[in-house]
Protein backbone atom coordinates (compact mmCIF):
# COMPACT_ATOMS: atom_id res chain seq x y z
CA UNK A 1 0.00 0.00 0.00
CA UNK A 2 1.25 3.43 -0.80
CA UNK A 3 1.06 6.16 1.82
CA UNK A 4 -1.67 7.93 -0.18
CA UNK A 5 -3.96 4.85 -0.20
CA UNK A 6 -3.30 3.70 3.37
CA UNK A 7 -6.27 4.45 5.68
CA UNK A 8 -5.65 6.80 8.56
CA UNK A 9 -5.50 5.03 11.93
CA UNK A 10 -8.54 5.21 14.24
CA UNK A 11 -10.64 7.39 11.94
CA UNK A 12 -13.40 4.80 11.68
CA UNK A 13 -13.91 4.82 15.45
CA UNK A 14 -14.10 8.58 15.93
CA UNK A 15 -17.70 9.82 15.92
CA UNK A 16 -18.49 13.01 14.11
CA UNK A 17 -19.04 15.97 16.41
CA UNK A 18 -22.66 16.11 17.35
CA UNK A 19 -24.60 19.31 17.02
CA UNK A 20 -25.40 21.00 20.33
CA UNK A 21 -28.63 19.78 21.88
CA UNK A 22 -31.12 22.09 23.53
CA UNK A 23 -31.52 21.30 27.21
CA UNK A 24 -34.54 22.69 29.06
CA UNK A 25 -35.79 22.86 32.62
CA UNK A 26 -37.47 19.46 32.34
CA UNK A 27 -34.12 17.76 31.71
CA UNK A 28 -32.28 19.82 34.33
CA UNK A 29 -34.69 19.49 37.27
CA UNK A 30 -33.91 15.84 38.10
CA UNK A 31 -30.23 16.74 38.54
CA UNK A 32 -30.73 19.77 40.79
CA UNK A 33 -30.65 18.00 44.17
CA UNK A 34 -27.47 16.13 43.25
CA UNK A 35 -25.75 19.30 42.01
CA UNK A 36 -26.73 21.29 45.12
CA UNK A 37 -25.47 18.47 47.34
CA UNK A 38 -22.21 18.35 45.37
CA UNK A 39 -21.72 22.11 45.67
CA UNK A 40 -22.57 22.13 49.40
CA UNK A 41 -19.93 19.48 50.11
CA UNK A 42 -17.28 21.61 48.45
CA UNK A 43 -18.34 25.10 49.54
CA UNK A 44 -19.85 24.42 52.98
CA UNK A 45 -22.35 27.22 52.24
CA UNK A 46 -25.89 26.13 51.31
CA UNK A 47 -26.95 29.50 49.88
CA UNK A 48 -23.82 29.78 47.77
CA UNK A 49 -24.33 26.22 46.54
CA UNK A 50 -27.89 27.09 45.47
CA UNK A 51 -26.61 30.19 43.67
CA UNK A 52 -23.96 28.28 41.74
CA UNK A 53 -26.40 25.57 40.67
CA UNK A 54 -28.79 28.29 39.53
CA UNK A 55 -25.92 29.85 37.56
CA UNK A 56 -25.21 26.49 35.93
CA UNK A 57 -28.87 26.09 34.93
CA UNK A 58 -29.00 29.67 33.68
CA UNK A 59 -25.90 29.12 31.54
CA UNK A 60 -27.41 25.96 30.04
CA UNK A 61 -30.88 27.37 29.40
CA UNK A 62 -29.60 30.65 27.93
CA UNK A 63 -27.25 28.77 25.61
CA UNK A 64 -23.94 30.01 27.05
CA UNK A 65 -23.12 26.32 27.59
CA UNK A 66 -24.21 23.81 24.98
CA UNK A 67 -24.59 20.10 25.52
CA UNK A 68 -23.17 18.04 22.66
CA UNK A 69 -24.09 14.62 24.03
CA UNK A 70 -20.51 13.35 24.34
CA UNK A 71 -21.14 12.42 27.98
CA UNK A 72 -24.04 11.90 30.33
CA UNK A 73 -26.01 15.07 31.05
CA UNK A 74 -25.25 14.87 34.79
CA UNK A 75 -21.51 14.51 34.15
CA UNK A 76 -21.59 17.54 31.89
CA UNK A 77 -23.54 19.58 34.48
CA UNK A 78 -21.09 18.57 37.22
CA UNK A 79 -18.19 19.67 35.01
CA UNK A 80 -19.79 23.10 34.54
CA UNK A 81 -20.42 23.30 38.29
CA UNK A 82 -16.79 22.39 39.03
CA UNK A 83 -15.62 25.24 36.81
CA UNK A 84 -18.00 27.67 38.52
CA UNK A 85 -16.71 26.56 41.95
CA UNK A 86 -13.10 27.05 40.85
CA UNK A 87 -13.94 30.48 39.44
CA UNK A 88 -15.64 31.46 42.70
CA UNK A 89 -12.71 30.28 44.80
CA UNK A 90 -10.30 32.19 42.58
CA UNK A 91 -12.39 35.34 42.93
CA UNK A 92 -12.59 35.08 46.70
CA UNK A 93 -9.12 33.81 47.47
CA UNK A 94 -6.70 36.11 49.15
CA UNK A 95 -3.25 36.15 47.74
CA UNK A 96 -1.53 36.95 51.03
CA UNK A 97 1.04 34.52 52.24
CA UNK A 98 3.05 34.27 55.41
CA UNK A 99 6.13 34.40 53.20
CA UNK A 100 5.35 37.92 52.01
CA UNK A 101 5.90 39.33 55.49
CA UNK A 102 9.47 38.10 55.70
CA UNK A 103 11.23 36.69 58.72
CA UNK A 104 12.39 39.96 60.21
CA UNK A 105 11.44 40.96 63.72
CA UNK A 106 11.70 44.64 64.57
CA UNK A 107 12.33 43.90 68.24
CA UNK A 108 8.92 45.19 69.34
CA UNK A 109 7.13 41.89 69.14
CA UNK A 110 5.96 42.59 65.59
CA UNK A 111 7.50 39.55 63.96
CA UNK A 112 5.66 37.17 61.65
CA UNK A 113 4.26 35.06 64.51
CA UNK A 114 2.52 38.12 65.96
CA UNK A 115 0.73 38.90 62.69
CA UNK A 116 -1.26 35.65 62.77
CA UNK A 117 -4.88 36.34 63.58
CA UNK A 118 -6.89 34.55 66.23
CA UNK A 119 -9.51 32.26 64.67
CA UNK A 120 -12.24 33.71 66.91
CA UNK A 121 -13.76 37.07 66.00
CA UNK A 122 -12.94 40.12 68.09
CA UNK A 123 -15.77 41.84 70.01
CA UNK A 124 -15.94 44.65 67.43
CA UNK A 125 -16.22 42.07 64.64
CA UNK A 126 -19.05 40.31 66.52
CA UNK A 127 -20.85 43.66 66.87
CA UNK A 128 -20.42 44.34 63.14
CA UNK A 129 -21.72 40.87 62.27
CA UNK A 130 -24.78 41.39 64.47
CA UNK A 131 -25.43 44.75 62.87
CA UNK A 132 -25.12 43.30 59.35
CA UNK A 133 -27.42 40.43 60.33
CA UNK A 134 -30.04 42.87 61.67
CA UNK A 135 -29.80 44.92 58.47
CA UNK A 136 -30.10 41.82 56.31
CA UNK A 137 -33.11 40.56 58.26
CA UNK A 138 -34.75 43.98 57.89
CA UNK A 139 -34.11 43.87 54.13
CA UNK A 140 -35.58 40.36 53.94
CA UNK A 141 -38.70 41.53 55.75
CA UNK A 142 -38.97 44.47 53.31
CA UNK A 143 -39.07 42.12 50.28
CA UNK A 144 -42.39 41.59 48.49
CA UNK A 145 -44.48 38.89 50.17
CA UNK A 146 -43.89 36.24 47.45
CA UNK A 147 -40.11 36.63 47.60
CA UNK A 148 -39.97 36.99 51.39
CA UNK A 149 -41.92 33.76 52.01
CA UNK A 150 -39.66 31.82 49.62
CA UNK A 151 -36.53 33.11 51.38
CA UNK A 152 -37.90 32.48 54.86
CA UNK A 153 -38.98 28.91 54.15
CA UNK A 154 -36.10 27.73 51.94
CA UNK A 155 -33.10 29.66 53.24
CA UNK A 156 -33.85 30.71 56.80
CA UNK A 157 -35.78 27.63 57.91
CA UNK A 158 -33.82 25.33 55.55
CA UNK A 159 -36.95 23.44 54.50
CA UNK A 160 -36.63 21.13 51.53
CA UNK A 161 -37.49 22.40 48.08
CA UNK A 162 -40.40 19.99 47.84
CA UNK A 163 -41.88 21.17 51.16
CA UNK A 164 -41.53 24.84 50.21
CA UNK A 165 -43.16 24.25 46.82
CA UNK A 166 -46.00 22.38 48.49
CA UNK A 167 -46.48 25.12 51.13
CA UNK A 168 -46.45 27.94 48.59
CA UNK A 169 -48.32 25.91 45.93
CA UNK A 170 -45.70 26.72 43.27
CA UNK A 171 -43.43 24.75 40.95
CA UNK A 172 -39.73 24.14 41.57
CA UNK A 173 -38.80 26.45 38.73
CA UNK A 174 -40.97 29.22 40.20
CA UNK A 175 -39.26 28.76 43.58
CA UNK A 176 -35.81 29.05 41.95
CA UNK A 177 -36.88 32.22 40.16
CA UNK A 178 -38.22 33.73 43.39
CA UNK A 179 -35.05 32.89 45.29
CA UNK A 180 -32.89 34.31 42.51
CA UNK A 181 -34.92 37.54 42.42
CA UNK A 182 -34.76 37.82 46.20
CA UNK A 183 -30.99 37.39 46.23
CA UNK A 184 -30.61 40.02 43.54
CA UNK A 185 -32.83 42.42 45.46
CA UNK A 186 -30.84 41.84 48.64
CA UNK A 187 -27.52 42.29 46.82
CA UNK A 188 -28.50 45.74 45.53
Image (tube, grey):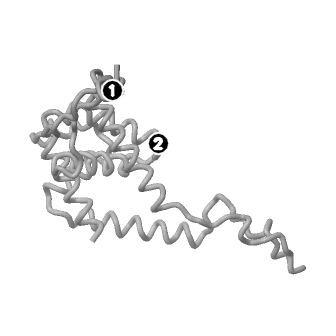
Residue at the image point whose x is 27% and y is 21% from the top: 12
Residue occupying the point 22% across, 36% down: 68
Give the class, few, some or many, for how many residues have Cα within 10 Å of label 2's Cα (few <14, many ≥20).
few
**Measured along the vertical axis of the image, is residue 59 above or below residue 136?**
above
**Is 183 or 57 nearer to us in this picture?**
57
Residue 174: give x, y in percent of width and height: 12, 46
Task: Give the label on residue 42, or none.
Answer: 2
Percent from the top left, x then y, of residue 21? 15, 37
Q: Is residue 95 left or right of residue 118?
A: left
Mark 1 — residue?
A: 8
Front residue (pair 131, 79): 79
Q: Which residue lies furthest to the top in this view?
A: 1
Q: How crowded is mark 1: few (under 14 residues within 10 Å), some or many (20 or more)?
A: few
In the image: residue 67, left or right of residue 130:
left
Counting from the top left corner in percent of width and height, residue 115 is at: 74, 70
171 versus 115 height, above or below: above
Which SS class for mark 2?
helix
Amino acid sequence: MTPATRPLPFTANVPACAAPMAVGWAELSPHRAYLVSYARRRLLDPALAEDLVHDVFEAVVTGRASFEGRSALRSWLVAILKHKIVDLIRQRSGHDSLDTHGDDDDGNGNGPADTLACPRPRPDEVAEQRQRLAQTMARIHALPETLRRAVELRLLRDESTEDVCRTLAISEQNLFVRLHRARRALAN
